[in-house]
């Protein structure tokens, strides 16, 4: 995706006011209805024959474990404003909220980063891309959380919906970004109990707001059957258990206590069975199947990949690097592929998706390790380069392996 097209990215942006009420409004860049329906179909969704319950929602995609990577990013002036205890409490609240989905969130790493160049962070900019290329870990199926000390436009947070076939850019900037002031015990009005992160993670799973973005009772709403029609968002906490009914001619009342409304953190504590089913299916079909990690290297023996163009005549070859230190290390080729992807992404060039590394020998002696990079995966039958004769010298290939970071069956060798 070109930087000029960034505003087309599918993001949900929640703002927090400096006043006590109303706390947030939302600027949502939501895909058109037909795009949403296509995504639901890609996620295996069909109209339910019976109303969902918590039990049958769990049966849909039960027992999933998701790795979580946390980044606390501040400038120097605010570097001491947040504590490990706040982060630990936030993670506990997140685990509890999604335990109802039968999903286990496992914290793999927490980073504390001080970088004035990233604060305040402006969404959908080169600045955001730079930060996330530096900090992001795991794959499209792993949750990256960014708590920053300041967001442009006084945003409370934003996150990205799952997409079928995400672009390199969307993989890079995926995750949820919140003001660090929304951490438990923070200073964001109405947003200091950890609910903002849970709300944003709901979007990461594919959930929309329970209220209609078009402010009508007849619009498709959040496409979840068991959340009542809701025209307006709710602000602050209701008095007692009194609920607003912004669509009195439709069944039910507003989802005041739902994480996907705008009610204060102190009042939100629920997802509906339909939301659980929807989010679980969206994750399982649009995120869990997208591999950003490289596969285990596959041996090609004494032959190297010889494939420059795909069946459409498009070039897939990026280039080759050679090491002449007499060693053979597969991991340094994989790392070179990753670094090339980051370099190319910043320049709107194709990412490295596949590599072939091998030893080139001259008259039987190790000459160098080659690392050839490609923009797509190739099958083993594309390994046709077994060497050549150069004058009196015999060039041969040994120890050849290939690996890919995309989960498919390769392409036809043309």
Image (cartoon, helix red, strand yellow):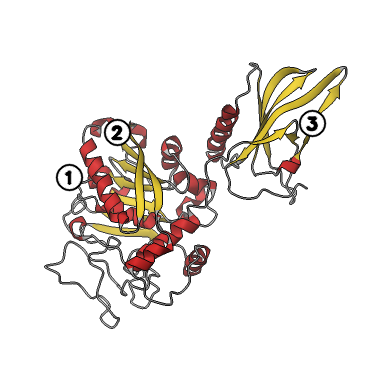
- Taking the image as drawn, is residue 3 in sight? no
Numbered tag placed on residue 386 in the rendering: 3
Upstream in sequence: badge 2 or badge 3: 2
Q: Distance between the residues labelled 2 and 3?
A: 54 Å
Which of labels 2 and 3 is toward the front?
Answer: 3
Upstream in sequence: badge 1 or badge 2: 2
The residue shown at (51%, 46%) is: 169
Q: Distance between the residues labelled 1 and 2?
A: 20 Å
Q: In this view, does 19 lie above or below 352?
A: below
Q: Name the residue under label 1.
A: 185
Q: How far apart are marks 1 and 3 (CA)?
A: 64 Å
Upstream in sequence: badge 1 or badge 3: 1
The residue shown at (33%, 64%) is: 209
Which of labels 1 and 3 is toward the front?
Answer: 3
The residue shown at (25%, 41%) is: 88
Numbered tag placed on residue 75 in the rendering: 2
Q: Is mark 3 on a helix, strand or loop?
A: loop
């Amino acid at each position: 995706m070109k930087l000029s097209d960034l505003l087309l990215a599918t993001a949900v942006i929640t703002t927090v006011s400096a006043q006590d009420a109303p706390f947030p409004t939302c600027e949502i860049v939501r895909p058109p209805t037909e795009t949403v329906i296509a995504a639901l179909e890609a996620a295996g969704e069909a109209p339910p024959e019976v109303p969902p319950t918590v039990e049958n929602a769990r049966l849909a995609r039960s027992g999933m474990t998701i790795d979580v990577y946390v980044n606390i990013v501040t400038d120097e002036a605010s570097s001491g404003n947040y504590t490990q205890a706040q982060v630990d409490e936030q993670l506990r609240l997140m685990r509890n909220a999604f335990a109802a989905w039968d999903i286990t969130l496992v914290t793999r790493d927490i980073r504390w980063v001080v970088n004035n160049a990233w604060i305040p962070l402006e969404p959908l900019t080169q600045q955001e891309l730079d930060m996330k290329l530096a900090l992001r870990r795991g794959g499209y199926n792993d949750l990256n959380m960014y708590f920053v000390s300041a967001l442009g436009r006084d945003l409370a947070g934003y996150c990205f919906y799952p997409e079928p076939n995400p672009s390199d850019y969307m993989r890079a900037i995926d995750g949820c970004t919140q003001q660090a002031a929304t951490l438990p015990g923070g200073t964001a009005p109405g947003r200091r109990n950890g609910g903002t992160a849970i709300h944003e993670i709901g979007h990461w799973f594919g959930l929309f707001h329970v209220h209609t973005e078009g402010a009508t009772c007849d619009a498709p709403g959040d496409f979840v059957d068991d959340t009542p029609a809701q025209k307006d968002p709710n602000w602050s906490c209701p008095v007692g258990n009194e609920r607003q009914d912004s669509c009195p001619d439709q069944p039910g009342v507003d989802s005041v206590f739902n994480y996907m409304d705008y009610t204060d953190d102190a009042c939100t504590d629920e997802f509906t069975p339909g939301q659980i089913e929807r989010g679980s299916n969206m994750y399982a079909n649009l995120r869990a199947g997208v591999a950003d990690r490289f596969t285990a290297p596959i041996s090609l023996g004494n032959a190297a990949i010889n494939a420059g163009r795909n069946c459409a005549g498009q070039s897939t070859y990026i280039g080759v690097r050679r090491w002449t230190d007499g060693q053979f290390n597969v991991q340094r080729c994989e790392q070179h592929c990753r670094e090339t992807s980051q370099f190319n992404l910043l320049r709107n060039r194709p990412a490295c998706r596949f590599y072939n590394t091998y030893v080139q020998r001259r008259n039987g002696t190790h000459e160098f390790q080659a690392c050839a990079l490609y923009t797509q995966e190739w099958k083993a039958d594309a390994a046709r380069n077994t060497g050549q004769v150069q004058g009196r010298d015999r060039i041969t290939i040994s120890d050849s392996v290939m690996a890919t970071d995309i989960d498919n069956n390769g392409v036809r060798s043309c």
